Amino acid sequence: MPKCDFCRRETAVKKCKIIDDMGTRYRNLCNDCITKLGAQSHIDILDETEEETAARAAIIGDVKLTTSPSFEGYRIVDYKGIIFDETLTGIGIRTVAKSLGDMFASLTGEQMHAITDRINELETELIDRMRKKAVAQGANAIISIDFERTIPGGNAVMVSASGTAVVIEKITEEQ
Ligand SMILES: [Zn+2]
């Protein structure tokens, strides 16, 4: 039986290319570790079939999202914990503003558009990473999603997202 290079379990493994802050490396990983590591790192599975890649993407894409504490028509059957992610972007200008609103007041429409577009991009990336984290924790939905935008320095915007990973189940008519 092959062994997973990460958890050392003897189980089925896949050849993976892992890319993150630590660089690029090749490891044989089990399915659990692929999901777990995939929350923080970019993983290309080298010997995965197209069908398997599509199935994995579908599971992540199917994670339901809401800013409210529940979903209409669904019940929460398990709480998997709070998930959080943040990212920073340079905004190409110097500002003394402490909030986004104050900063926008001093900008031209064009500058404002460029920064708003960048923030929207970052929020989409964050949501994608949050979905992966939720799947890594065995959840199929994220509730109470909250975005925060702050200006930590004079020329950057920090976007953070938090939410609670949960397992939801559709409420059927009979119940
Ligand atoms: Zn493993």
Image (spheres, rainbow, N blue to C red):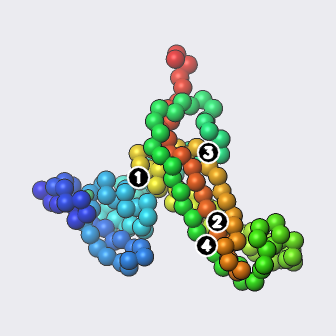
Q: Mark 1 is on which residue type? A: Ala
What residue do we see at 31% from left, 58% from top?
A: 33
Q: Mark 2 is on which residue type? A: Val
Quarter-of-image position of residue 14: bottom left
Residue to which mark 2 is pinned: 159
Q: Judge by depth and name the residue closer to the eye, 87 or 99.
A: 99
Q: Is residue 82 left or right of residue 104?
A: left
Q: Is residue 34 left or right of residue 40?
A: left
| Label 2, label 4: how far apart the Cα atoms are | 6 Å
Residue to which mark 3 is pinned: 144
Mark 4 residue element: strand
Mark 3 residue element: strand
Q: Is mark 1 within 8 Å of ligand 1?
A: no
Residue to which mark 4 is pinned: 88
| Residue neighbourhood size for the residue with mark 3, other residues' Cα within 10 Å, grouped as few (<14), some (14–19), many (≥20) | some
| Label 3, label 1: how far apart the Cα atoms are | 18 Å
